[in-house]
Image: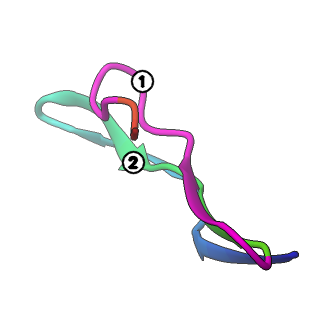
C-alpha cells in the first residue's frame, strides 16, 4: 500500500465565512486507487 499526501489542511477566512483546504490523500494498493478528502464543513460534498 502507498499513501501520498496531496494537500494538508489549513484554516482560513473570507468574506463568505470559514474557508480553507482539507487534507486530501491518494491511497494505492495493488488492485485499487482511492482518493480520500475530508472536505470543508458545509462546502465540499462527498466523493463517490
Q: Is residue 20 above or below residue 31?
A: above
Toward the right, the furthest residue is 1
Toward the left, the furthest residue is 15
In percent of width and height, residue 8 lies at 60, 64
Q: Quadrant of the N terminus?
A: bottom right
Q: Is residue 37 above or below residue 17?
A: below
Toward the front, the furthest residue is 31
| Magenta-span inclusion, residue 32 | yes
Toward the top, the furthest residue is 42
Q: Is residue 24 above or below residue 1?
A: above
In percent of width and height, residue 47 lies at 39, 40
| Residue beneath disc 2 | 20
Callout 1: SS: loop
> Which residue is at a point 50% across and 49% down the rendered structure image?
22
Q: Are marks 1 and 2 in contact (CB under 8 Å)?
A: no
Dominant SS type (magenta) = loop
Total count of labels = 2
Callout 2: SS: strand
Q: Which residues are magenta?
A: 30-45
In percent of width and height, residue 42 lies at 32, 19
State the separation of the CA atoms marked 1 and 2: 10 Å
Pointer 1 or 2: first along the chain: 2
| Residue beneath disc 1 | 41
> Which residue is at a point 66% across and 67% down the rendered structure image?
32
Q: Quadrant of the C terminus?
A: top left
Q: Is residue 24 left or right of residue 46?
A: right
Q: Quadrant of residue 26?
A: bottom right
In percent of width and height, residue 11 lies at 49, 45
Q: Quadrant of residue 44?
A: top left
| Magenta-span inclusion, residue 42 | yes
Q: Residues within 10 Å of mark 1 (few under 14, many from 20)?
A: few
Amino acid at each position: 500500500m502507498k499513501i501520498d499526501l496531496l494537500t494538508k489542511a489549513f484554516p482560513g477566512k473570507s468574506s463568505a465565512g470559514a474557508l480553507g483546504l482539507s487534507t486530501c490523500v491518494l491511497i494505492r494498493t495493488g488492485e485499487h486507487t482511492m482518493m480520500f478528502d475530508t472536505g470543508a464543513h458545509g462546502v465540499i460534498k462527498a466523493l463517490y
